[in-house]
């Protein structure tokens, strides 16, 4: 499983039996955090989460950890969507360790800035029939200066940044917590837009962004406009599924998990009549143990929603340890 923009890590002075891992995502007007650890019953544990919308700044993360009495072994930051590109490319025919460098020269005439100023990684898709790696990949491209800026901001906030990820892979981590023989998908609407990802064989195979379909659009719409938005979202969902199954003929999308993020709208119920896939509401407790802080916090009045991207980012090291990858 390819890993993103990882930084060198030195052994801790004292090995923790159940280390905590922190995921951080900063979007316009909101900072979200989540802490997870490996669980003893085969499920990861969501230890704590929170979000900040009042002048969000990375310095708040350290203060929050101190207030909660939490220490973390790794910190994974999820890049904002405007800070990177994902390009569909042929897989370089070189050893796995050399793919990122090979991909760099394939994208140099596509991106609008010098390739010497780029951080590039390569995500290899499964073969269409599922037999090993395929001939197509995602090239993940980010400006080196933007990565450096986030590293600087993290140092100033006294966060020991371990890696920088992208939201699509953070969401992928949620889908691969439980091994599935068939492909699965996750649909979520947030304050900044919508996202649909499809994972198979542990890899991110397909993704769509709906920048003009967000929670606010649904919340503010009248009945007719809301119905139009739902029909459009269902159409995009069905088109994505059809395209995926044409490309990957060795599988089909077994189910689509839907984050019920729009107030007073049951997205599963509203979308189900318009698509051929099985839709299910995504419930964090079905895939992870919920720690005491989490269950207590969820019962508070006006409790913040759990950020799926922050949780997925925090899961990075759990997935790495489980699948035997290198951080």
Image (cartoon, rainbow, N blue to C red):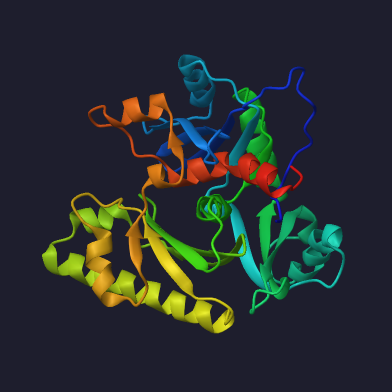
Of 113 and 53, the residue lying toward us: 53
Which of the 4 quarters of the picture holds residue 7? top right
Quadrant in which the N terminus appears:
bottom right
Give the mark count: 0
Please state the horizontal and vertical placement of residue 260, each as a whole percent of the image: 30, 52
Of 247 and 216, the residue lying toward us: 247
The residue positioned farthest toward the left in the image shown: 223
Please state the horizontal and vertical placement of residue 150, each as a whole percent of the image: 63, 38
Quadrant in which the C terminus appears:
top right
Please say whether residue 196 is visible from this viewpoint. Answer: no
Please state the horizontal and vertical placement of residue 237, each as a whole percent of the image: 39, 72
Say left or right for 66 vs 219: right
Residue sitting at x 54%, y 62%: 180
Residue sitting at x 42%, y 79%: 239
Figure check: 175 above or below 250: above
Say left or right for 129 vs 233: right
Say left or right for 127 vs 194: right
Say left or right for 80 vs 152: left
Figure check: 151 above or below 12: below
Of 135 and 79, the residue lying toward us: 135
Figure check: 314 above or below 266: above
Residue sitting at x 67%, y 27%: 160
The residue positioned farthest toward the front in the image shown: 41
Of 108 and 136, the residue lying toward us: 136
Please state the horizontal and vertical placement of residue 283, each as a whole percent of the image: 36, 48
Residue sitting at x 34%, y 60%: 280
Please say whether residue 217 is visible from this viewpoint. Answer: yes
């Amino acid at each position: 499983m390819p890993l993103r923009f990882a930084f060198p890590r030195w052994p801790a002075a004292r090995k923790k039996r159940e280390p905590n891992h922190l995921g951080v995502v900063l979007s316009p007007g909101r900072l979200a955090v989540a802490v997870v650890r490996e669980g003893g019953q085969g499920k990861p544990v969501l230890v704590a989460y929170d979000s900040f919308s009042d002048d969000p700044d990375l310095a708040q993360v350290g203060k929050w950890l101190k207030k909660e009495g939490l220490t973390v072994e790794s910190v994974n930051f999820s890049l904002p969507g405007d800070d990177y590109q994902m390009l569909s490319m042929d897989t370089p025919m070189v050893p796995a360790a050399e793919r990122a460098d090979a991909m760099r020269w394939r994208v140099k005439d596509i991106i609008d800035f010098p390739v010497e100023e780029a951080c590039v990684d390569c995500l290899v898709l499964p073969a269409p029939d599922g037999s090993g790696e395929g001939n197509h990949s995602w090239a993940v491209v980010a400006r080196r200066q933007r990565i450096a800026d986030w590293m600087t901001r993290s140092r100033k906030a006294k966060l020991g940044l371990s890696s920088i990820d992208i939201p699509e892979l953070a969401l992928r981590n949620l889908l691969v917590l439980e091994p599935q023989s068939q492909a699965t998908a996750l649909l979520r609407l947030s304050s900044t837009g919508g996202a649909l990802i499809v994972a198979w064989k542990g890899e991110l195979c397909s993704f769509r962004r709906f920048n003009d379909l967000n929670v606010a659009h649904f919340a503010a719409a009248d009945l007719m406009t809301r119905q139009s938005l739902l029909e459009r979202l269902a159409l995009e969902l069905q088109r994505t599924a059809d395209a995926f199954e044409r490309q990957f003929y060795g599988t089909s999308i077994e189910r689509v998990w839907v984050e019920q993020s729009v107030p007073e709208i049951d997205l599963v119920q509203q979308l189900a009549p318009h698509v051929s896939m099985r839709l299910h509401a995504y419930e964090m407790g079905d895939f992870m143990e919920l720690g005491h802080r989490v269950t207590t916090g969820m019962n508070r009045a006006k409790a913040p929603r759990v950020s799926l991207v922050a949780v997925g980012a925090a899961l990075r090291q759990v997935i790495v340890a489980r699948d035997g990858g290198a951080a």
